[in-house]
Image (spheres, rainbow, N blue to C red):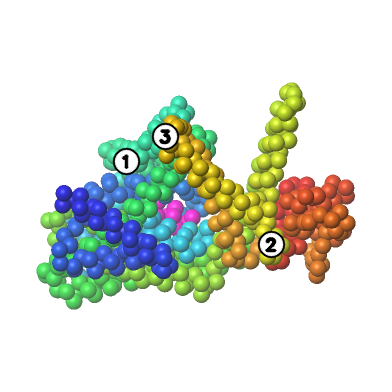
């Protein structure tokens, strides 16, 4: 009962602190660390010592898998060079650099223990990078590099730590370290690939979302344990399996399975990520108590902690800037058009927060190791220092350096373009099906109408007439009110007991799915209303060659005026300057103008919009 109460108290504290942090827009990981440190000194709070098995087997596999399965394999592959340079090269550089600093500050510490300290503090944490980087809106490429680095650097650091701990009692050669690294990395990749093959085979046979989701809960633990059993890297195995399975999920899994798995792993990651930071803070009391008993004295240990913290930050900056030609190719970003510069490198260097893996790795050092308390307190200092120091200042630095965050307008434009291109392929397939089939019920027309409504809603997110509801806005508001009325009526019928409960639950679930889609669309529109900046992204010769005509001061659709109809948004032909209404409008005069003239490019003439559309290639610019 005491253990159960403690677990519930931890969960309740995590959820409460996280909710308060989000309410006041303070990073929850940083708040939880501070709360954990304070709670460790509160009388009555039991002493919690993180056991390495709990972290390395209980927390690390699900956290790594959750991050990997949601990481784009395409983006990862595009950034593999900087990821490998950081996850392998920087770990080795930091390990030896920190070891040299420890030897300089405390000469009595032998090289093996100094290298163990360096390996422990070398790897930044995947949880910290994701939790803080995404929240403050760092550029997507920086977040991808940080996530990729954090997914693989644990393996490098744990191999280096294993070699250093072994060398404490014996002699380890460079050849042995290299051999262990190859076995760990190669074996991890092999087990991860084998896990992918086995799970992929099973998912081809399974369509039940519950069974599919249950299998996904086993994957990270199975891959990790099997890899560690053959002395390979469980970290690499979990990451490889997660990346591969996430990449092929749209092909292997049913839609219901993907939705269920996504929500389950989001919930698991949300709880575990925040719990980790609270547990880090709860280690403060007993760690500081053990330092007071060290033969080196509190002053010497404090100097060592400060020196290692500074070394960790400086070494990362030195490595990033020395290798920035390989880490980031400066110049315009191919997607956003933004000029990449030293600011990107600085943020990558500064975003090296350490986390729970550092503490867990420190605890794996045998308890009879001389001066082990120094290693533990150094690890805790680096974790707390980087989380609080770098984590708190990272948002401010990102703003001061004017590094652009992902623009909701760009996202909305890309979403609308992608849906338009997908719809084109779908309609082409529909035409093929309709050739050999009669359509007395006008099913084709109904499908086309629904596809157009979906596409129109995506384009309308970019903006319509100021102060007026777009058709999709009005649809969402009216349909939301209808769903509320429908749900009330279903609940009234449920209370009579005249309809089986399974049928009632099924109908309520259908209403919930539709309402969630409306809520997601409204959230996207709210993000767009908060920003107004647009980026150019030319992708075809028509967009590149089209003149940059300025919109008229008071644009109108003359044909709509003549017909007495009302437009939703206006577009202008960049060949002749003709202004027409968009496809969400009743008469669709802009598209009609293209069909009549074959002028390929038009642009939006709505306020604060400068995107263009090529009718020929269905691309935006």
Residue 411 image position (x, y, % from top left): 60, 56
Q: In this view, does 206 lie to the left or right of 223?
A: right
Tell me the distance, in whole angstroms, between the alpha carbons under discs 3 and 2.
44 Å
Residue 532 in view here: yes
Q: In this view, does 37 lie to the left or right of 298?
A: right
Question: What residue do we see at 60% from left, 54% from top?
Answer: 477
Residue that label 2 marks = 468
Question: What residue do we see at 32% from left, 43% from top?
Answer: 234
Q: In this view, does 485 lie to the left or right of 572?
A: left
- Magenta segment range? 144-152
Front of the two marks 1 and 2: 2
Residue 97 image position (x, y, % from top left): 32, 65
Front of the two marks 3 and 2: 3
Tell whether position 435 is magenta.
no
Most foreground residue, 484 or 73: 484
Tag 2 secondary structure: loop
Residue that label 3 marks = 497
Residue 350 in view here: no
Circle 3 crowding by C-alpha within 10 Å: few under 14, some 14–19, many from 20 = few
């Amino acid at each position: 009962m005491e253990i159960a109460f403690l677990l519930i108290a931890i969960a309740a504290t995590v959820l409460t602190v996280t909710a308060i942090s989000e309410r006041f827009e303070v990073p929850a990981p940083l708040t939880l660390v501070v709360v954990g440190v304070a709670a460790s000194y509160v009388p009555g709070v039991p002493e919690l010592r993180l056991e390495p098995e709990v972290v390395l087997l209980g927390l690390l596999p699900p956290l790594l898998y959750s991050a990997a399965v949601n990481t784009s394999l395409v983006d990862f592959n595009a950034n593999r060079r900087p990821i490998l340079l950081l996850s392998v090269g920087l770990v080795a550089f930091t390990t030896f650099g920190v070891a040299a600093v420890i030897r300089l500050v405390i000469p009595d510490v032998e090289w093996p223990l100094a290298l163990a300290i360096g390996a422990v503090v070398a790897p930044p944490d995947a949880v910290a990078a994701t939790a803080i980087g995404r929240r403050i809106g760092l550029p997507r490429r920086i977040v991808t590099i940080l996530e990729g680095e954090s997914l693989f650097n644990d393996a490098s650091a744990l191999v280096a730590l294993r070699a250093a701990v072994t060398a404490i009692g014996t002699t380890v050669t460079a050849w042995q370290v290299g051999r262990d690294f190859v076995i760990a990395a190669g074996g991890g990749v092999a087990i991860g690939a084998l896990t992918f093959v086995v799970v992929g085979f099973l998912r081809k046979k399974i369509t039940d979302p519950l069974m599919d989701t249950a299998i996904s809960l086993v994957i990270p633990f199975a891959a990790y344990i099997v890899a560690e059993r053959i002395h390979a890297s469980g970290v690499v195995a979990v990451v490889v399996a997660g990346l591969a399975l996430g990449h092929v999920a749209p092909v292997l899994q049913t839609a219901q399975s993907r939705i269920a798995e996504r929500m389950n792993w989001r919930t698991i990651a949300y709880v575990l990520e925040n719990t980790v930071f609270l547990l880090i803070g709860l280690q403060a009391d007993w760690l500081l108590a053990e330092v007071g008993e060290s033969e080196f004295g509190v002053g010497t240990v404090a100097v060592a902690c400060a020196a290692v913290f500074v070394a960790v930050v400086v070494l990362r900056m030195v490595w990033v800037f020395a290798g920035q030609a390989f880490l980031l190719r400066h110049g315009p970003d191919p997607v956003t058009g933004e000029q990449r510069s030293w600011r990107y490198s600085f943020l990558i260097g500064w975003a090296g927060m350490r986390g729970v893996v550092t503490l867990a790795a420190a605890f794996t050092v045998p308890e009879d190791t001389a001066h082990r308390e120094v290693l533990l307190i150094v690890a805790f200092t680096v974790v707390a220092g980087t989380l609080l120091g770098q984590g708190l200042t990272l948002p401010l630095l990102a703003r001061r350096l004017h590094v652009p965050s992902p623009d909701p307008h760009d996202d909305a434009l890309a979403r609308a373009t992608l849906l338009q291109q997908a719809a084109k392929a779908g309609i082409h397939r529909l035409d093929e099906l309709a050739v050999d089939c009669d359509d007395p019920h006008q099913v084709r027309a109904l499908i086309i109408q629904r596809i157009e409504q979906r596409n129109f809603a995506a384009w309308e997110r970019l903006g319509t007439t100021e102060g007026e509801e777009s058709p999709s806005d009005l649809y969402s508001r009216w349909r939301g009110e209808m769903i509320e009325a429908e749900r009330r009526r279903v609940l009234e019928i449920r209370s009579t007991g005249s309809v089986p409960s399974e049928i009632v639950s099924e109908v309520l679930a259908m209403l919930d799915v539709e309402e969630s889609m409306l809520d997601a669309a409204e959230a996207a529109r709210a993000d767009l209303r908060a920003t107004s900046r647009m980026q150019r992204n030319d992708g075809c010769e028509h967009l590149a060659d089209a003149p940059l005509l300025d919109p008229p001061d008071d644009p109108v659709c003359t044909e709509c005026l003549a017909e007495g109809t009302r437009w939703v948004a206006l577009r202008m032909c960049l060949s002749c300057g003709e202004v027409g209404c968009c496809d969400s409008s009743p008469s669709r005069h802009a598209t009609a103008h293209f069909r009549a003239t074959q002028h390929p490019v038009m642009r939006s003439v709505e306020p604060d919009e400068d995107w263009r559309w090529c009718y020929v290639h269905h691309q935006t610019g």
